[in-house]
Amino acid sequence: VHSFAGKDKPDIVEAAFGWHHEAYIDKKGVLYVCAKAKVTSVKVTELKNGERKLTQVKLPPGAGNANKVTFTRKRMFVCTDKGKIYSFKIVENIRTQEEMMF
């Protein structure tokens, strides 16, 4: 996966996959999220397999480092090394059939 290859990239130790999102925790306890990667059954030039745009999630001050992440359909739950649990609401943006085709 290109987003994780290289010295300047996160060293991922934990991953979780939701309905529409993916979450990753690196060995420093930093949490990243991205849209679920599109993997097609045939090669599509416009879709590069393994490309993910990672966004770092900032936990509140004093939360500690993320060490576990999981999803339900409408929420992402994050546990920290300080024993705290945080819930993040997932907002789905429904795309039209035309948008999904192009």
Image (spheres, rainbow, N blue to C red):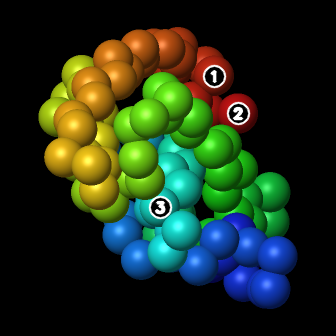
Residue denoted by label 3: 29
Residue denoted by label 1: 99
Residue denoted by label 2: 102
Disc 1, SS:
helix
Disc 2 crowd rating (10 Å Cα; few below 14, some 14-19, many 20+) is few
The reply to whether the C-beta atoms of the residues labelled 1 and 2 are less than 8 Å apart is: yes
Residue 20 drawn above or below residue 22: above
Front residue (pair 56, 43): 56
Disc 3, SS:
loop
What residue sits 74% from the left and 73% below the top? 9
The reply to whether the C-beta atoms of the residues labelled 3 and 1 are less than 8 Å apart is: no
Which of the two discs, 2 and 3, labels the residue nearer the N terminus? 3
The answer, for residue 23, to whether it is visible in the render is no
Residue 11 drawn above or below residue 41: below
Q: Amino acid at mark 1?
A: Glu
Q: Amino acid at mark 2?
A: Phe
Q: Position of residue 11 (x, y in %)?
A: 59, 79
The quarter of the rendered structure image containing the N terminus is bottom right
Front residue (pair 31, 92): 31
Compared across the picture, whether 98 is left or right of 91 comes to: right
Which of discs 3 and 1 lies nearer the camera? The answer is 3
Residue 55 placement: quadrant: top right
What residue sits 63% from the left and 44% below the top? 56
What residue sits 36% from the left and 69% below the top? 14
Spatial separation of the CA atoms under disc 1 and disc 2: 5 Å
The answer, for residue 86, to whether it is visible in the render is yes
Which of discs 2 and 3 lies nearer the camera? The answer is 3
Residue 25 drawn above or below residue 92: below
